[in-house]
Amino acid sequence: MGSGFPPHGGNLTQEAKRLGIRSDQLLDASASLVPFQPPRVMRAALRRAIAGTALRDYPDRSQIALRQAIADWHGVDDACVLPGNGAAELFTWAARDAAAHGLSGLPQPGFADYRRALSCWDAGVCSLPLPLDWAGSGPEAFPTPLDLESRVGTLWLTNPHNPTGQLWSRSSLECLLDRYPLVICDEAFLPLVPGGERQSLLPLVATHPNLVVIRSLTKLLAVAGLRLGYAVAAADRVQRWQRWRDPWPVNGLALAAGQAVIADRVGLSRWTRRVETWVADEGAWLQQQLMQLSEITPMPSSTNFFLIRSDASLVKLRERVARRGVLLRDCRSFEGLGERWLRIGLQNRRGNRRILRALAAELS
Ligand SMILES: Cc1ncc(COP(=O)(O)O)c(C=O)c1O
């Protein structure tokens, strides 16, 4: 993309090749994934689906069972739910609607895929710079960019924000719904945030036809390779997107796995609590440890990734740490960040110790 720096983390194969090591020797903290095996119920459903007809048959084009399961889970109308091939596919359709409203306002630094989606439709984009200092990891007010708002037709929100990990309070987002013709809120990481659901905009979809909430099961369930996400929006918008997209965007394995995991409501709450506990405990532990190191400052975060900043360039440090087998996210592709920032994806304790050892060895 434009900057020439990779727009995403998780480029394991290329990085391993570049570094001359096997990809299984690398610890990938450049992507932000839950370090657990996907839920047992999900793995069992996948085995059953493979043994059955899910590979041979075309999947259900209307994804009725999965829609219903997601709708029951969130207490929304099933006509307002659209499962997708990851959240990323749904950004593409959200962007088509956004293009019809003129300029899209993108808080920056921000997630790169919204630009990719908007570029499919030649949509105009304007950056809304976020202040780069924040103190705590609790819900905070979204800093409304007053100077640009009159030109913006669609506001793209990420809650919690990527790459900063800031959690925006629902009350500060709610008032934006009256100011913009379209608001797209990406809540990909919200279910991982301890207490995060209280800030969700999902309960507002029923009363705000200009709101789209997009979620990813990739993050919560550790299934980036399976591809599963969903949008919750007004029924007529969902129907329109359904008409535009490919005939079978959600494959049979993803349908089976998603249905099984959501139907097991008790197991899903247990899983979510496990993930939240991991974020709270490991996040606090790793931040505390990193504060002891010189030259870098870990920034507070509500979720399973956080930024570190320095007064000097961290590009060489990232490379030296990579040569020790630990990949951190280069932040040069994030508008407004650059060389003095890196992003770290939280791991299990063993992985976090490995990150710490690699950084400590290079900073001492
Ligand atoms: C903020 C954010 N939203 C969405 C996604 C993509 O989710 P999915 O894997 O479901 O397409 C990512 C992936 O990194 C992300 O960081």
Image (spheres, rainbow, N blue to C red):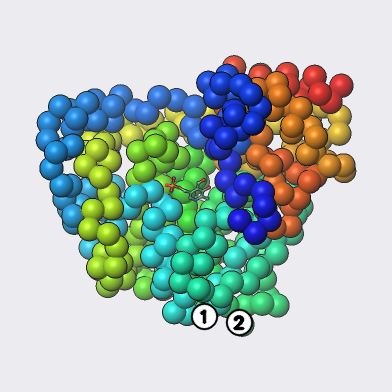
Residue 289: give x, y in percent of width and height. Answer: 74, 24
Q: Which residue is mark 2?
A: 151
> Tag 2's secondary structure?
helix
**What residue is pinned by disc 1?**
102
Q: Amino acid at mark 1?
A: Gly
Query: What residue sits 28% from the left and 41% below the top?
Result: 254
For the point 80% across and 34% down, which residue is it? 316
Label at residue 324? none
> How far separated are the C-alphas under marks 1 and 2?
8 Å
User: Sequence order check: which comes first, mark 1 or mark 2?
Assistant: 1
Q: Quadrant of the C terminus?
A: top right
**Whether label 1 touches label 2, CB < 8 Å:** yes
User: Which residue occupies the foreground of this view, 4 or 268?
Assistant: 4
Q: Is residue 288 above or below residue 232?
A: above
Cβ of mark 1 under 8 Å from ligand 1: the answer is no
Give above or below for 268 relative to 23. Answer: below
Residue 208 seen anywhere in this rendered image of the structure: yes
Q: Residues within 10 Å of mark 1 (few under 14, many from 20)?
A: some
Q: Which of 258/319 is in front?
A: 319
Instruction: Indicate the amino acid at tag 2.
Output: Arg
Residue 238 in sight in this render: no
46 on left or right of 216 = left
Question: Is 30 drawn above or below residue 109 in the view shown?
Answer: above
Q: Residue at x 84, y 25 (%)?
A: 363
Ligand 1 is within 8 Å of the C-beta of the residue at disc 2: no
